[in-house]
Image (tube, coloured by chain):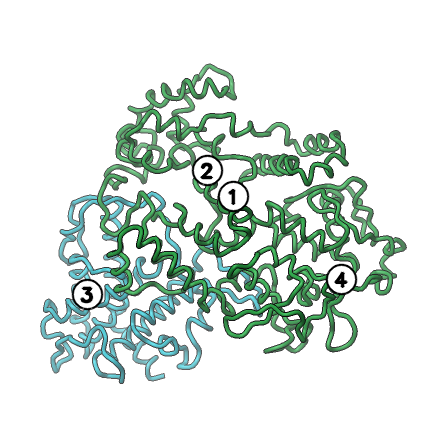
Chain colours: A cyan, B green
Amino acid sequence: MVFRSRAISAASTVLAVVLALCAGLCGCASKSRRAGSSDAAVVADGPPFADVVPFSASLKGEVRFKGAERIEADFTQALQLKPTKLCNELDRYSCIGLVHRIALAGVEPYRLSLYEAPQHTPVSAPIAVERVALSGCVRRVDIDLGRTAGTPLIFHELEIGADGRLVDPQGDGAGQALQRLAERVWLRPARQDEIAALRQLYQSAAKSNSSQPARDWAVLACFTVLTSLESLFY
Amino acid sequence: MLLEMSSMTVGERRPRNFFDADELKLKSMRILRARSRPAHANALRQFGACRVLGLLASTTILVVLPVPAAAMPSGPELFCGVYVDAPGCAQRVRCSLCHTSAPARNAYGADIAAKLLPRHSRPLSSAEYRDNLEAALRAVEALDSDGDGDTNLEEIEAGTLPGDPTSTPSAGGCGRNNEQFNVCDYDLPYAYKKVKLDFCGASPTFEELDQFRSLDQQEQLARLDQVLDGCLESAFWRGPDGQLWQLAHPKIRPVASLKDGVNKGPIPLADYESAYNLFVYANTGERDVRDVLLADYFVERQGETYRAVEETALEGMQKARRAGIITTRWFLVINTMFTALPRLTASQTYRAFLGLDIAKLEGLYPVEGEPVDYDGKGVRRPACARCHSTLDPLSYVFRNYNGLTGGKPYRAIYVPDRLELAFQGEGPRIGETPEAGVIFGEPVADLRAWAAVAANSDAFAEKTVLDYWRLLLGREPNGDEQSEFSQLWRDLRGRHDYRVERMLHDLVKTRAYGVP
């Protein structure tokens, strides 16, 4: 329950702002890919995507939702968490294995006669995915920042001041954390425009009334990457 | 138009949501396919040519019979003969070059059709089509068929689709760079990641993917096979509730409340795990997948290890009467009990293992003189007889298979006079119900013979591969992919000797699977 209240707290403070930025990031990235234009696409109030160049787009344009089991495996692999620690409703019931299994395109043949996964992603899938991602990110960041016992992995080199803020939002510590995050989730190095966009999140976190903007930023950067199209579809 | 003839060869699978005309065309193809099978020829002769023609006429099929595919020149080949250097011709040209969903044409295909001997009556002869297509292609080069701002010729030269406004040279075609994916050809790192996700259930790590990229192409191919072999052993693939179990769910249709054995439900009638075990066993290793319908053994599981056994505590079918999953206690309990003529058992087998759903008018092979209506259900009425003339002869072979026999523990066994003993109230003719039946127009003496015809049919191989195709690609094969799909199930029957894992090694190397 403690974990749950922390997650809700983090979400309620800056989630709305970040989601808006995520939408901007996705939308702009998508636009630049579709158009293949060298014109700089711009995140709201952010730097231009100067590095984005035209590239061949897939003629299929076909990706598949990973679904419950693969999301659980990939999230736990990326965040180095045990499945039992990734997300539990009421601290007891597995989000993926039980509570949100159907929402995440799983099947339940034995009691519900749902023999096959739906052809299309269920309408409640985004909410369930975000719930799981946010939970996992809170876990990972709290371990990395020494708030919970465990082995640091991604955000442990952030320099955080006594006021809970990043000492240098543009510094190497944040950049390296984002690179590690991208490599673990996207399986590739992050591009500079992606790093810039994720750094940009910090401005919103810092403007909020949160007493721990550095932690909130880390959680939401993780959340942004984990809920990206590239992370959830294949 | 360019591809409609070349891509629609007899026996190929079409998406199920096509128009009525196509439905009729497909049925006509199935009938023609049946006629082409030596095994079915005798049975069809039994109906007589008039009956076959009558059936064709009654379903208005004759008007849409396809021209034999081999007679018409290949549209893509002719196209690439004109545009030799087009990037799209370095790979196989896609149906979507000219079609939305073949035979429907997109804007580019429609423009070509309008320029192709416009004053000639249709259909064009092969020679007319072959000799005049280039002129039609040239005539539409300067047009912008899809209205995206680029002429058709510019799009052809850039490797984009002139009939698709979202595919433009400015959006990037095959000629442009893409650091992450080879979007125009089989992409080995992409396929590697997919194999890990599809068969092992998790992405590779960054380091694993990086290491894979560092290999040369031959090494990557070898590594891909190696990873696939490893994943085929994983719990994600073959364990309880793994991918193979998920493939089996619609076939077995488990109900937890009726489960016997481990984790039994409140009304333990049979253990469906026995059916799952046999399914996984036959679909893994160097084993014959036809055993799902032919096995005269049972399978037990420990963890992810499956082992064939002669008997199990919860099964009891006589060895000489066994026919794989369809004679397990669960299958007979859930489908046969408590009916005299087990039509549901037959139709579920037909649907689940052969991909033919009688309720959707699929796989109809009417038998002369049928249905007799031994159980007095009124199935001779015209509205019923059309399907029941196929379904009832399919069902007779199940007449003596009983799911719940005796007291606890119940047994699923073959009871020679099952109908006579337990279903006297089902009409005066119930005892006349024969055990001999008919499947695909072929007379069979009993269920084992019925299962042998089923397991050796094209339909079984096609359905087996289709299940995996849908599992791994999330949809049925589209027009572009028909030849790869067709090759897979033909190879399953042929050079792969019904070994599923061999087929899967081919499936993951198809363009459908490995081109991003």
In the depicted view, which residue is nearer to us: B87 or A27? B87
Q: Which residue is mark 1?
A: B15
Question: Within 10 Å of the Cα at label 2, are there few (<14), some (14-19), or many (20+) other Cα atoms?
Answer: some
Q: Which residue is mark 2?
A: B101
Foreground label between 4 and 3: 4
**Residue A167, percent across and down?**
10, 75
The Cα atoms of the two marked residues, 4 and 3, are separated by 63 Å
Q: Residue at x 64, y 38 (%)?
A: B37
Q: What element does badge 1 sit on?
A: loop
Quarter the N terminus of chain B occupies: top left
Residue type at mark 1?
Answer: Pro
Q: Residue at x 20, y 74 (%)?
A: A155
Do labels 1 and 2 touch, CB within 8 Å?
Answer: yes
Q: What element does badge 2 sit on?
A: loop
**Of callouts 2 and 4, the N-terminal one:** 2
Q: What element does badge 3 sit on?
A: helix
**Residue B416, percent across and down?**
82, 61
Judging from the image, mark 1 belongs to the subunit labelled B
In the depicted view, which residue is nearer to us: B507 or B350? B507
| Dot label at residue B57 | none
**Residue A218, percent across and down?**
21, 72
